[in-house]
Image (cartoon, rainbow, N blue to C red):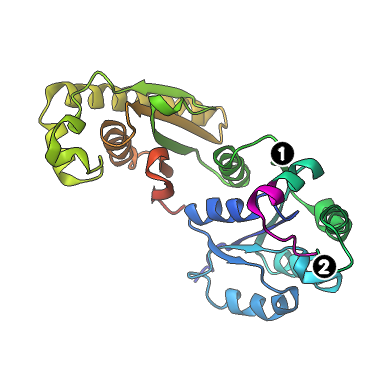
């Protein structure tokens, strides 16, 4: 019996840079995520994940400066062991400018993990940069989050994963026009011309994922026609993106409040397209959560 391919991504970087966001993005892609695992435990983790290839087919580990220098060397040694034992292993490093990190720590009022009685924030950041330099030097990709928001950083992480895998990831994003159009969209569809469930009191508090809203919308011929037209358009043109080695395509679906029509249509597109695309991500911006609703295993 052939052993399944196991993929390990190590996420490291400067505190405040966005490691937690990166791990959340990887979790959305189906990775089993472990944050702040002490480096000293890595030698024992190797045989454990090797003996459970189905459970740990995709694993992501968050490693930061709290592991200290000796343990960080263990991380590099463990990566060598993984590759020698036929694991796919990548290292992603998240960083940001010092001024940005200081601002983030000031706004959140969190303590830097290396601050103490003998170090102020600026000294702690400099010490962490020096401590993590060996990991940064070995990184497969360094992402600078200085000028990116949380959603842009998530997309950079998804793109990093896609560049080391096959196939095209389709990202379907619902949003509210009144809160601005998302950046980096490849296609944009406006559902504001469709009937709005918001004006029906029994549907107002629900979302486009609820059955009552779905049935109400699907009863309208314009909704059915728009859904059909958009599905046909994407089915016709997405293969061309895939043939050009495109990592992912982002489709934005907007309505007034980002709660009913756009959410419904994003979900409907995911269902309609899942048979012909290996990976589909659905993100409902106004619902406050990112979620991987469908992704077929390779």
Residue at figure coordinates x 81%, y 57% from the top left: 135
Marks 2,1: beta carbons within 8 A: no
Going from N to C along the chain, the mark reached first, 2 or 1, is: 2
Q: Circle 2 sits on which residue?
A: 116
Question: Which sits in the foreground, 239 or 163?
Answer: 163
| Image position of 190 with respect to 54: above or below | above
Other residues around mark 1 within 10 Å, as few (<14) / some (14–19) / many (≥20): some
Give the quarter of the image for residue 67: bottom right
Question: Quick check: can you spot residue 295?
Answer: no
Residue 263 located left or right of residue 251:
left
Give the quarter of the image for residue 72: bottom right
- Residue furthest top in the image: 193
**Marks 2/1: CA distance?**
25 Å
* Mark number displayed over residue 261: none
Name the mark nearer the viewer: 2 or 1: 2
Mark 2 secondary-structure assignment:
loop
Which range is magenta? Answer: 104-114
Give the quarter of the image for residue 90: bottom right
Q: Which percent across, then down, holds residue 139? A: 77, 51
Residue at figure coordinates x 74%, y 49% from the top left: 140
Q: Which percent across, then down, holds residue 235? A: 35, 28
Q: Circle 1 sits on which residue?
A: 146
Question: Quick check: can you spot residue 286?
Answer: yes
Q: Which percent across, then down, holds residue 217? A: 16, 32
Residue at figure coordinates x 18%, y 24% from the top left: 195
Question: Which sits in the foreground, 92 or 262?
Answer: 262
């Amino acid at each position: 019996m052939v052993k399944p391919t196991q993929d390990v991504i190590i996420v490291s970087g400067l505190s405040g840079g966005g490691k937690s966001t990166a791990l959340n993005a990887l979790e959305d892609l189906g990775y089993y995520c472990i944050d702040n695992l002490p480096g000293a435990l890595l030698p024992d983790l190797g045989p454990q994940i090797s003996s459970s290839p189905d459970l740990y087919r995709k694993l992501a580990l968050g490693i930061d400066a709290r592991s200290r220098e000796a343990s960080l060397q263990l991380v590099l040694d463990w990566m060598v062991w993984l590759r020698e034992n036929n694991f796919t292993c990548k290292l992603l490093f998240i960083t940001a400018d010092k001024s940005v990190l200081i601002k983030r720590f000031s706004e959140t009022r969190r303590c830097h993990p290396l601050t103490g009685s003998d170090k102020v924030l600026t000294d702690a950041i400099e010490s962490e940069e020096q401590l993590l330099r060996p990991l940064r030097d070995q990184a497969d990709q360094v992402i600078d989050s200085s000028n990116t928001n949380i959603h842009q950083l998530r997309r950079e992480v998804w793109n990093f994963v896609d560049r080391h895998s096959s196939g095209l990831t389709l990202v379907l994003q619902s949003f509210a026009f009144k809160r601005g159009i998302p950046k980096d969209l490849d296609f944009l569809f406006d559902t504001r011309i469709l009937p709005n469930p918001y004006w029906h009191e029994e549907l107002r508090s629900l979302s486009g994922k609820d059955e009552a809203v779905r049935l109400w919308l699907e009863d309208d011929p314009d909704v059915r026609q728009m859904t059909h037209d958009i599905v046909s358009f994407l089915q016709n043109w997405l293969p061309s993106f895939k043939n050009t080695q495109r990592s992912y395509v982002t489709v934005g679906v907007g309505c007034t409040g980002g709660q009913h029509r756009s959410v419904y249509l994003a979900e409907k597109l995911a269902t309609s397209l899942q048979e012909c695309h290996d990976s589909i991500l659905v993100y409902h911006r106004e619902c406050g959560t990112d979620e991987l609703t469908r992704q077929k295993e390779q």
